[in-house]
Amino acid sequence: MSYKMETSNLSSNLAPIVKVENFHLHYYTRRGVYKALNGVNLEIRKGEVLGVAGESGCGKSTLGRSIMGLIPRNAAVVNGRILVDGKDYLKPLNDYYKKAKKFKPTKNADILKKVNEEMSSIRGQKISMVFQEPMTTLNPLLQVGYQIAEVLYYHNPGLLASRRLSRHRATKEDMKNIIKILKENGINEKLTDYLKSRNILGLEDQVISIWRRKDLHDLKKEQIIEKLCCEPINSFTKKYLEVIEKENKLPNFSRVPIIGRLVKRELFKEGYKKASEFLGLLGIPNADKMVYMYPHELSGGQRQRIVIAIAMINNPELVILDEPTSALDVTIQAQILELIKELKESTNSSYMFISHDLSVLAEVSDRIAIMYAGQVVEVGKKENIFDQPKHPYTQMLMEAIPTIEVHELKGIKGEVPDMRNPPKGCMFRDRCPYAMPICAEKRPDLIKVGEDHYVACFLYEGGKS
Amino acid sequence: MIIAARQLSKFFDVKGVKNAKIRAVENVNIEIKEGEIVGLVGESGSGKSTLGRLLIRLIEPTSGEILYNIPDDELDEFDIALKNNDQNAVKKIVDKYSIMRLHGKELKTFRRNVGIVFQDPYSSLDPRLKIEDIIAEPIVETGFLKGPKVKARVLELLDEVQLPREFSYRFPHELSGGQRQRVALARGIATNPKLVILDEPTSALDVSIQAEILELLKELRKKYNMAMLLITHNISVVSYMADRVFVMYAGKIMEKGNKNDIIKNPEHPYTQALISAVPQIKRVRQRIILKGDPPNLINPPKGCRFHPRCPVALPICGWTADEVKPTLEYLISSKYFTEFSNTKVEVKDELELTVYNAKADKLREIINIEKENLRPLMSIKDIIDENGNVTLKLYKYETPELIKLENGREVECLLFSKFKE
Amino acid sequence: MKEKMSKKDMTDKNEIKPDRWRELRLSLQVFFSNKAAVAGLVIFLFYFFDALILQFFPQILPFKHPYSLTPNYADPIPLPPSWKHPFGTTYPGVDLLRAVIKSIRLDFWLSLEIVIPGAIIGLIIGIIATYFGGWIDEVLMRITDIVFSIPYLVLAIAIGYVLGRTLNSMMIALILVWWPLYARYARSVTLETKELTFIEAARASGTSNFKIMFKHILPNSLPPVFVQISLDLGTIMLTISALAFIGFLPAANLPELGYLTSLGYNYIQTAPWAMIIPGLFIVLFALAVNLMGDGFRDVIDPRRRSEL
Ligand SMILES: Nc1ncnc2c1ncn2[C@@H]1O[C@H](COP(=O)(O)OP(=O)(O)O)[C@@H](O)[C@H]1O
Ligand SMILES: Nc1ncnc2c1ncn2[C@@H]1O[C@H](COP(=O)(O)OP(=O)(O)O)[C@@H](O)[C@H]1O
Ligand code: SF4
Ligand code: SF4
Ligand SMILES: [Mg+2]
Ligand SMILES: [Mg+2]
């Protein structure tokens, strides 16, 4: 993980990591075909927090999961595509749907398997996801340290090997130099350059995490850092760790029963270390004890932090947070929101923050997308969405949210359409006070109404705003 | 007062563990006037639902009194009698107004006068009954109406909650979440109760539906002048609905007062943090981020239950040696480790610790520097040198009680009782 | 608002019926998508119609003595299957096809007569135990455990001694042994139901405990218990047959599958069909109701109802 402040210029920040184009997804069930996503258009840019809001059942989670490729077998990719770094992983599913006369979940499942295999290389590494209920992600039978180490073990074993080897290769001299650099310059490129030149780059995150600790006296930090060197290692372990360090993947011999066990033990031991460092960075007190605990021993807020740690540990480009605070109390929610803000500052990842609560999104997002009945109906900068909401649904939603500052509340009459049989025209028509004849015939597309501000509504077609 | 509780406590047994009790509600005093909406806010697990259930006797209290329909002057008399420990006067009023003495017919009449609406509109309606039978249940069972009048009342109630009359023949699974909650509401007000407990009535609903239900609740209150206890963790909802607010934390009432006062000018440190933590579209207030989690109610913190998280805790707020020990150890082993060698901390009793191999002066100096940030250190009263070892004595803690401030606010916090003295 | 509503009313009215049909159709769909359950149902229906016809319309069938076996002492040694005797014969010269058809009647009804009263007793006790909880629960469940631990054979034999070896005494014995199973099961189901909020809502409405039990808890506990019954019918038939096999039948010549099996027992080496065929019919029934019960379980499982 890079802790350096990102200095890249703004324009490259705007390039999208994920691009969703006219994406349609249907769920086939015994009760009918639920048209969960009906032409979603959206992009997630580098380094931004994109908030996604909407009522329950409007397809927020489905969208998040589709980007991850985590969809069930009864989900048909009907149309459109999702580009992750320019690649459309779901294409085979769409091809199957287009080719098949009758959609069969079993056939879909076969293709899904292949898609999953292909995506497993980016999941947890390039993109990761945090769910509302932490217990769905955490295994109740495993220590939390193990679960974090596992992610590293499968996606980034080279890092673990390099950490261990660097501690072996580093000399007392090195440590003195490192401390000197830290004292003179703090944490910056100099340190990285030095470590690189000495072939002990695996020390970087270890040293930094110690140096960043606020609860230690500087002298104590130096003492701990000094101890990071000259760790003995047996020649056999050294051999296989060197292979792993070079390849950054689990070598074939790790499948051999006994050797595999040894490799795994060594790497997991290192994984626990990294896990406790990382939890410390996330502001968890007593992180070194916490890694040996089981999920049920933790409070809801702590569990959610662990899940966020698992999602963040490989320094992914995009983290999808699906209602990460909805099950938490306000004071704990505030802690987690604060954490996400800090992460946003200290990493250069992008975030897709899904929530049904607009005021939560207001706290963390750069841009906000409003979804209704499987479509993005409005998307724009946070300020624009809150100050000049354009879509009638967004406007009415703002009036329906109770806030601490008392204002008249207005509910939105009527209900969301039955998604098995959605109306032909605008999905919001039945509840919209401005509905026009054309709204019953065509579905509006997203059009630009201001700088970086798009709305799908016929009120704005023809340049009106 | 339509209802008042005095020294009300409810302890639940812990399954499988003898002598352990969950102190879900402890020593709570509240009162609700005719026709007012009172918001009860607090984090989950703070005992809100338990308190709501106690008030309408769905569960029996461990101790304390719940007085129904008691005139204000007699409640004052009761409070004085409690203060003076005047058993006779207490008994006289308890016999007259307590809901605990109700049986049979009287209890049914009481049930007719109170109603409840639960959070989950899916599990709170019996899936095997038609909507009309669900709404009719309290009407029939409390003897509110009989025969054909029941059906007429059910239809009237459906109108009241703005559902089509045809819904009376439907089953719950044929309705959406918002519609079900309207049915639950119709059942809650079916017998024209004087008090309705609303336990998170909109927490399971979407905002667009929530706004409509809240609107409806306001209308009903206006029309029938019912008192409502609105239990919720959503402060914005309370801010919109309530006349008065009670703030609960870890089984205790922390603050009571008028809605506007509490929201705009919270006095209690917990209320301040709670209100500042509410996510806001336009942030005006500085956020106070509380550390840690709400406490375990089996073994709650001593003194003030909020003290481990309180940003302004005083030396007497409930600190014990068990809480001071890890703080000292942390200082000794990390921040000031150069100053100590071979130093150990041991708890002697609730209010006393011994630090082995340390100097009193050094310790005093460090504690003085650090106590602003590490609140447990504030509770150290004396630092006594005993040839090489140091004995630390803590202040004796106090338990705050709900006290009334001049502005009419009631607060349970030692910051205020100190000023009063 | 009001106008909109009244418009909605009209459409709602029309929707009500199809809505309800949809749930039923869905249940059937779920059941029929489970192929094994359908096979079970088909087999079960064979047994059911066999039992129904023999009980109420025996005249349709070409049997002179529908309620007893017809021996042929002229040729008592079992004969292998042939055109004349498709299932062969068993000692003493009884045609197995006819014997099996006649036997199913007794086994089938007896199973029902044991399961249903057993289930009713069990449900009542289970519900009382759960609803009141505390020491009532404790006492009732202890009694249940004690009865549960008595081996059914011992009890059946004991009751046989006291009441005489009749079908009724066998039935009573088995009911006595069987209810604890349901009591335990009903208790676990009702315990779950009791935690649902609508029970608390009923209490808040002033409904008495007694009424809550029968109006809310019982109806909501019936479907899972019904599934359990359907799974159990097979076990009961096995038990009855086992009792008959060891000679616990009031009269010889009474057509009963276990008894038929015992007739072939002496010829197991020379004429295996004499034992295998009636045995097969016992096992087939047990298997069929089990598969069918699985199908019912799918039907009441909300997850199964919504997936494809
Ligand atoms: N696995 C599934 N099978 C069938 N329908 C599903 C499945 N998952 C979600 N749905 C349906 O798709 C719609 C969108 O769901 P979801 O994406 O979870 O919405 P949100 O997260 O916005 O609440 C809903 O109507 C839901 O019922
Ligand atoms: N029936 C019960 N048995 C045991 N513990 C209970 C019971 N009901 C509530 N509790 C406990 O009492 C505490 C307060 O719960 P509750 O009143 O539901 O809080 P809230 O409604 O504020 O979330 C919780 O710790 C909860 O686990
Ligand atoms: S397109 Fe028409 S119906 Fe849809 S939101 Fe705009 S005005 Fe309303
Ligand atoms: S009594 Fe007041 S100051 Fe003391 S801990 Fe409690 S809330 Fe904080
Ligand atoms: Mg969701
Ligand atoms: Mg609650």
Image (cartoon, rainbow, N blue to C red):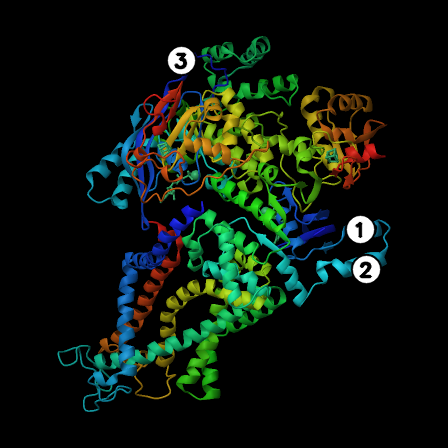
Instruction: Write the residue at 48% across / 79% down.
Output: C155
Circles 3 and 2, Cβ within 8 Å, touching? The answer is no
Q: Nearer the viewer, residue C293 or B47?
A: B47
Question: Could you say where residue B59 lies in the image, as x and y percent from the top left?
Answer: 64, 57
| Element assignment for label 3 | helix
Per the model, the C-alpha gap separating discs 2 and 1 is 14 Å
Q: Chain of mark 2?
A: B
> What residue is disc 1 on?
B73
> What residue is disc 2 on?
B92
Q: Is residue B304 left or right of residue B274?
A: right
Of the two numbered discs 2 and 1 on the same chain, state the one appearing first in sequence: 1
Q: Is residue B278 left or right of residue B407?
A: left
Q: In the current view of this chain or complex, which residue is farthest to the left? A: C83
Question: Could you say where residue B397 lies in the image, as x and y percent from the top left?
Answer: 80, 37
Question: Could you say where residue A173 lies in the image, as x and y percent from the top left?
Answer: 55, 11
Q: Quadrant of residue B304?
A: top right
| Element assignment for label 1 | helix
Task: Please tell me the numbered disc located at residue B27.
Answer: none
Q: Is residue B291 visible?
A: no
Q: Chain of mark 1?
A: B
Q: Within 8 Å of ligand 4, the CB of disc 1?
A: no
Residue type, numbered disc 1: Asp
Per the model, the C-alpha gap separating discs 1 and 3 is 72 Å
> What residue is disc 3 on?
A11
Q: Chain of mark 3?
A: A
Residue type, numbered disc 2: Lys
Q: Nearer the viewer, mark 3 or mark 2?
A: 2
Do the dots labelled 3 and 2 sit on one chain? no
Q: Within 8 Å of ligand 2, the CB of disc 2?
A: no
In this picture, is A31 found above or below A174? below
For the N terminus of chain C, give its image quadrant. top left
